[in-house]
Amino acid sequence: MILEHIHQLHCVAEGENRKGGSSMANSVVIENAWVRTQGDRIIGFGPMGGQPEFPADEPRIDCSGCLVLPGFVDSHTHLVFARSREEEYVDRIRGLSYEEIARRGGGILNSARRLQAMSEEELLAGARLRAHEIMQKGTTTVEIKSGYGLTVEDELKMLRVARQLQYELPMTVRTTFLGAHAIPLKYKDQREEYIRLIVEDMLPKVAADGLADFVDVFCDEGFFTVEETAHILSQAAPYGLRPKIHANELANSGGVQVGIAHGALSVDHLERTGPVEIAALRDSDTIPTVLPGVSFFLGIDYAPARDMIDAGLPVAIASDYNPGSSPAGDLQFIWSLACTKMKLLPEEALVALTLNAAAALDLSHEVGSIEVGKRADLLVTEPMESLAQLPYYPARNQIEQVMIGGEWIK
Ligand code: NIG
Ligand code: FE
């Protein structure tokens, strides 16, 4: 398959497996370009005029006026959930905070009750719809967390659903075990018992069934402490589960430092992050992942992504698609928030949504840029002058065609 006469081919990278600081604004672009795929791989690209003779019968599409980008990588989602929580949304409009709703047994515990009552088939059907929704918007790789089960059986059920999506969908899927998402009400006064359940019961079963690629803990005020997080992460390490943790959303909790100390691939959220955390990240390989959909939806501060990039860090951006804090899986919308609210340049945000997000999943050798040998995950936009038109329109699907693993799914 040949895509030709592409107005701008945004390759994003040339050999790097992540980009930090000022290099994020210099993403690799070829004007008037072609790209060629074979099977599920990219096998060539370059400027028009310089291309080799292609067989006359090889399918071609004319991309005049359009941009071609790597597929988006959503490195942090809770895509498997039972149902929406719009009643809590209305409570928040009336003045309750996210934390107050959580303290009275709503929030994550509300989602857990609903998920526990739902069959695996029903759960899969809902998650599948959401997966198709985000593929239509340009997501070609997705990470999916557990964490609404909170019992051994229900955590396993969630992870089986996520794994099933990996088998049946063209998207690349990675799964994360988040048993430490909230303390169930029944363990309210004996939290160490729930942590024992996570470590002694859930982790070995998750590992034995090969259900998770990574481990996560909600390390924040009112959820899990730094010490509890350290314990869970160190118990997960022998199973080969690298951490990707929720940190510094509600308070400057020490989550960033504990994640770094345990070799986390990423620390995510970071709405409450200052110079000390930024300095710690500079001395590490951990990717800071920001989730502007949460700040938009909960009305809280945005993570200081601009300061992070100015400090040289390789920032990633993800949707956090979930029913409580970010019911938005559309990465074009998230891109727009990152530019408008966090003051990222359109090119910087593109790197954050592709290459750096792939690095946050340890997948940047496979996806996240347009390079020979990488997976043929490509997006074709509607005709536009420049990349800035994508975040400029916050609520319009400007991705006209989506190729995942060499096949057009849109
Ligand atoms: O990433 N912060 C923790 N967990 C999710 C929200 C979970 C929920 O409210 O359902 C998040 O924001
Ligand atoms: Fe999350």
Image (cartoon, rainbow, N blue to C red):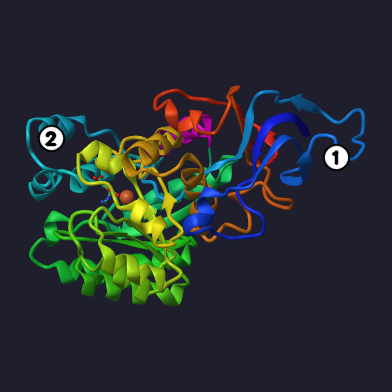
What is the magenta range? Answer: 121-138
Q: 80 left or right of 325?
A: right
Q: Under tag 1, what secondary structure? A: loop
> Which callout, 1 or 2, points at the residue further toward the start of the chain?
1
Q: Position of residue 163 (x, y in %)?
A: 49, 50
Query: Can you give x and y, in whole percent of width and height, for residue 171 in the image?
Result: 56, 42
Q: From the viewer's perspective, tell me whether residue 116 is left or right of residue 318.
A: left
Q: Secondary structure at mark 2?
A: helix
What residue did someone put label 1 on? 50
Q: Which residue occupies 35% across, 40% down?
A: 119
In this view, the residue in front, 9 or 400, is 9
Q: Is residue 44 magenta?
A: no
Q: Badge 2, how many Cα within 10 Å: few under 14, some, many 20+?
A: some
Q: Judge depth for marks 1 and 2 and give the one in front.
A: 1
Image quadrant of residue 330? top left
Asked if one can make out residue 319 in the rendered structure from this viewpoint, the answer is yes
- Front residue of this view, candidates 222 and 313: 313
Residue 255 sits in quarter: bottom left
Q: Amino acid at mark 2?
A: Arg
